[in-house]
Every structure is written in C-alpha cells, then in structure tokens.
Image (spheres, helix red, strand yellow):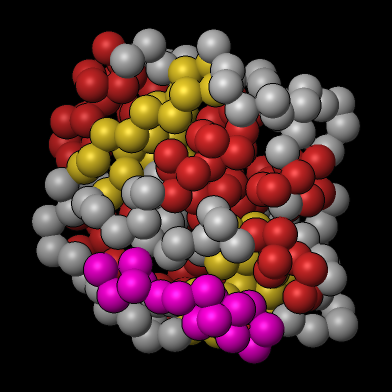
Amino acid sequence: MTALGFLYPGHSAEDDYPRLEQLLGSDVRLDVAHTDIGEDAHRVDALLEMGSPERLTAGVEQLRLSGAEAVVWACTSGSFVYGWEGAQGQVRALARSAGLPASSTSFAFVHAARELGVRRVAVGATYPDDVAALFAAFLRAGGVEPVTLRASGVITAAEVGTWSYDEVLTLARAVDGPDVEAVLLPDTALHTAAHIPDLEKELGKPVLTANQVTVWEALRLADRKVNAPDLGALFTKEPLVQAG
C-alpha cells in the first residue's frame, strides 16, 4: 500500500480525490487534509495568505499520522503566486514540517510537462488576468512555454467547483491550437477527474489538470509509477505498474 497525503484548500473539488484513488487501483491511498483558506478569492493578497506556512502546517500532522509517504500542497494559485523561488521555499518548509518529501501543484504541472516531453502548452485558467499571468510566468521559469493563455475571471473557488464538463471543454477548446502540445487546466477547484479521457479525445492531445497532476506528483515523490489510462496520457508512460 502506498499512502499519499494532500493539503487541499477548503472544499470545492475535493471529491476528485476519491475518484482518482478508485482509478489508480487498490494499493494506493489518497488522504486529504483540508486547510483553512481564509478569504475565498483569486486575488494575490488572499492567495499569499492561503499558502502561508501557518495554514499549511496546521494540516500536516493529520497526514503524517495517516502514514503518508509524501505530501503535496494541492493548490496551484496558492503556490505559483509566490514565484518560482518562493514556491520552492514553500515546499521546503512543508517538507521540514511534515518530515516527508513534499511538492505543490504548480511544480506538478512543470514536472508533468517534462514527463510528457512537451514544452509548448495552452493554459485555460479560471483565474482573473493578473493571477493567470503569474502562472504563465511560473511555467516559463520551469522551461514550459504558454503559447496561449485564457483567463476566465472567476474570483472564487466555490464558483469554479460548480463548473460542468461542457464549461471545462469549452475553456480547453478555446485555448487549443495546432502549435499546442498539451492543454493545461490549472485549478484544483475544477472538477476534472471524470473527464480527462474525454477531453483528450476531443482535443487529440494530452490534457493536464490540477488534481490529476497533483496525484501524479505525489506518486513521483513516492517513487511509484501507475498505469491508469482513465487518467490520461500522463498515466500511460513507461515503465508502468498496471492499476488493478
């Protein structure tokens, strides 16, 4: 059994995690601890506060007691808002606090793109323009080039959590193009776990979504590779252990 821990901000799309666990197979457990988000707002000051060490540390003990082998801060905006260096510091502090390998969803996107060998990507963001631009800058710092970027201007995670598959697909299609190697949907408040194969079939290329890459990143930290085609191209890379 591989146990993995996630610090998830508030309550929006946390039900993606039981679904992801089911699709991964019987020997992977995903434990989620909810952090206090403070003000629910895709605004730089609120996001900096949401990702503060005090808020993250509060959930660590629960995950450590669950037997987690790695921990990931399951929040994109609450990590990339610190910039590349700041997000590295955030992860280092989390690792020290947990006594475990640690990462965040922002780094998960960069590592997943590298895993797939893609560099030119499209970003379909739910965030306002200024926050979306910070994610684009973070990707560039990691060697990933956003060819297209769309900001949807949604202020709260609560609203993002209500988006339907059709709304997600519309956003993905809006940013896709012939020179795009993969489409990124960077918000852990967005329900995507049930839709990744359909999105990839519609677009004809890999789709990386926040909760998907977050779980993949935790598996990477735990030195596990799982073949789970229902979770998209990212989960069909060799060498593999078949999900059962």
Residue 192's spot in the image, x, y percent?
Answer: 52, 61
- Residue at x 54%, y 31% (from the top left corner): 218
- Quarter in which the C terminus is drawn: top right
Q: Is residue 108 above or below residue 196?
A: above
Taking the image as shown, residue 110 lies to the left or right of residue 92, namely right
Is residue 139 in view? no
Taking the image as shown, residue 230 lies to the left or right of residue 35, namely right
Nearer to us in this view, 15 or 2: 15
Residue 52's spot in the image, x, y percent?
Answer: 23, 45
Residue 232's spot in the image, x, y percent?
Answer: 72, 52
- Residue at x 27%, y 12% (from the top left corner): 65
Nearer to us in this view, 13 or 135: 13
Stretch in magenta: 158-174
User: Majority secondary structure of the magenta segment?
Assistant: helix
Is residue 179 in view? yes
Q: Quadrant of residue 241?
A: top right
Q: How many numbered marks does the figure carry?
A: 0
Q: Is residue 233 above or below residue 220?
A: below
